[in-house]
Image (tube, helix red, strand yellow):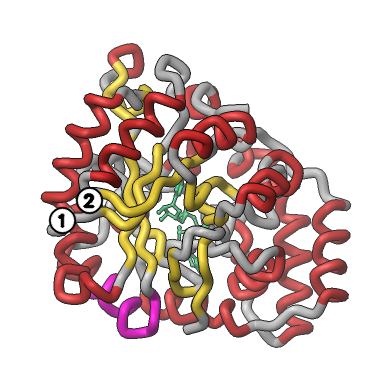
């Protein structure tokens, strides 16, 4: 697969990575471990070299699955994981509280290294900005982990432009991982100019709009227990119905291109900037293969403009996050 470099850091990865979260967490029942391991190895065989996990996915289980799956290929792949969540006593002990204190980060990294069966994490993200810990302290802790050889690159997730600048001044940031897709284009104004200026790569998460852009979430869809989409306003009720207008735009465009909607969604992201590396997630081999086809779907400048204009003409209904998730978004 075509390679991309995240920012000016020199971190080279396949143009599309694999988001591993849904194999264990967040989108319904977990995939059986041996099947999840096989899916990840199928991705390696097809040229994917960039794998995304986090301590909180499970918690812990997803890092274990990713570690087991990638152990035989360790030197050929880039593993990204994240710290920064902990159980929240005011939310039934669910992992929705932020903690990016230096001592905590160092402890989390020791656990992640063990679960990932590795002695160094290629890319370590702060999962959410912790309003109670100055970002300089967090960046300083990651800097020490880099100096100790336990981490190679520093990343942030859902951080705002000011935080990115402050963190980058202490420890250069290799990548920002935030939601970005035809379903959520706010980063184009809020952070992408800063990323470009500072030479930081961008890793869009939920690049298929958590599946919505593929047209497989319809009025009839019911989400399984533990599927975060059941709690997100954009995916439910009248908002879901209204947002089908965007699915239609992507679907029609895909038909004209003789491609799949998933491929259009990913090709559109790749066409925005050469330092963007989306990480679509799936639990199914056929969909993995379909998604990887997005890396070779060329869109002309005119086609990108057409999609930009068509999507801009649709106002997405419903909040992106529920209140508990929204509390942790940094502006
Ligand atoms: N930093 C953060 O806070 C954060 C937040 C969310 C996600 N992430 C990362 O980003 C990765 C991707 O995001 P995501 O999983 O939320 O959303 P996504 O990649 O946009 O969509 C995944 C969903 O789409 C479905 N899907 C995938 N390919 C499909 C296809 N070709 N046709 C139809 N449906 C398809 C999957 O179902 P099947 O499994 O049934 O195919 C799954 O339900 C995650 O795995 C995680 O690593 C990070």
Identify whether 115 is placed above or below 232.
below
Label 2 packing within 10 angstroms: few (<14), some (14-19), many (20+)? few
Please state the horizontal and vertical placement of residue 87, each as a whole percent of the image: 27, 24
Residue 240 in sight in this render = no
Identify whether 85 is placed above or below 235.
above
For label 1, the residue is 119
Please state the horizontal and vertical placement of residue 35, each as a whole percent of the image: 21, 70
Q: Which residues are magenta?
A: 38-48
Mark 2 and mark 1 residues within 8 Å of each other at the beta carbon: yes
Point out which mark residue 81 bears.
Answer: none
Label 1 packing within 10 angstroms: few (<14), some (14-19), many (20+)? few
Residue at position x 52%, y 22% from top?
Answer: 327
Q: CA distance from mark 2 to mark 1?
A: 8 Å
Identify whether 138 is placed above or below 44.
above
Query: Which quadrant of the figure contains the C terminus?
Result: top right
User: Which quadrant holds residue 249?
Assistant: bottom right
Work out which residue is located at the far top of the displayed protein and give it. 90
Cβ of mark 2 under 8 A from ligand 1: no
For label 2, the residue is 149
The kind of secondary structure the magenta stretch mainly shows is: helix
In this rendering, position of residue 176 left or right of residue 300: left
Residue at position x 15%, y 42% from top?
Answer: 111
Nearer the camera: disc 2 or disc 1: 2
In this orientation, which residue lies closer to the viewer: 69 or 15?
15
Q: Secondary structure at mark 1?
A: loop
Please state the horizontal and vertical placement of residue 277, each as a whole percent of the image: 53, 64
Q: Give the total number of marks visible in the rendering.
A: 2
In this orientation, which residue lies closer to the viewer: 313 or 127?
127
Please state the horizontal and vertical placement of residue 298, each as a whole percent of the image: 70, 83
Q: Is residue 40 magenta?
A: yes
In this orientation, which residue lies closer to the viewer: 252 or 289?
289
In this orientation, which residue lies closer to the viewer: 23 or 229?
23
């Amino acid at each position: 697969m075509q390679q991309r470099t995240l920012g000016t850091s020199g971190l080279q990865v396949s143009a599309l990575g694999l988001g591993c979260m849904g194999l264990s967490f967040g989108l319904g029942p977990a995939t059986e471990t041996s099947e999840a391991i096989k899916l990840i190895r199928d991705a390696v065989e097809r040229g994917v070299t960039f794998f995304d996990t986090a301590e909180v996915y499970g918690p812990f289980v997803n890092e274990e699955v990713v570690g087991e799956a990638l152990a035989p290929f360790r030197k050929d792949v880039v593993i990204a994981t994240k710290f920064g969540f902990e159980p929240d006593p005011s939310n039934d002990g669910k992992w929705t509280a932020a903690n990016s204190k230096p001592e905590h980060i160092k402890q989390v990294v020791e656990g992640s290294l063990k679960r990932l069966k590795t002695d160094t994490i290629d890319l370590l993200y702060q999962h959410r900005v912790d309003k109670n810990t100055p970002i300089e302290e967090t960046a300083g802790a990651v800097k020490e982990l880099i100096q100790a050889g336990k981490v190679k690159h520093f990343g942030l997730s859902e951080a705002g432009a000011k935080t990115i600048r402050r963190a980058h001044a202490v420890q250069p940031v290799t990548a920002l991982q935030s939601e970005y897709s035809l379903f959520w284009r706010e980063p184009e104004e809020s952070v992408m100019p800063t990323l470009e200026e500072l030479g930081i790569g961008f890793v869009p998460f939920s690049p298929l709009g958590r599946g919505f852009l593929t047209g497989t979430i319809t009025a009839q869809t019911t989400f399984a227990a533990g599927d975060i989409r059941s709690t997100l306003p954009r995916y439910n009720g009248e908002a879901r119905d209204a947002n089908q207008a965007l699915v239609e735009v992507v679907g029609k465009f895909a038909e004209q291109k003789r491609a799949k909607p998933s491929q259009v969604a990913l090709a559109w992201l790749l066409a925005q900037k050469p330092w963007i590396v989306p990480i679509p997630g799936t639990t199914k081999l056929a969909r993995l293969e379909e998604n990887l086809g997005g890396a070779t779907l060329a869109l002309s400048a005119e086609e990108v403009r057409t999609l930009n204009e068509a999507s801009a003409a649709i106002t997405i209904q419903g909040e992106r996050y529920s209140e508990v998730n929204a509390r942790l978004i940094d502006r």
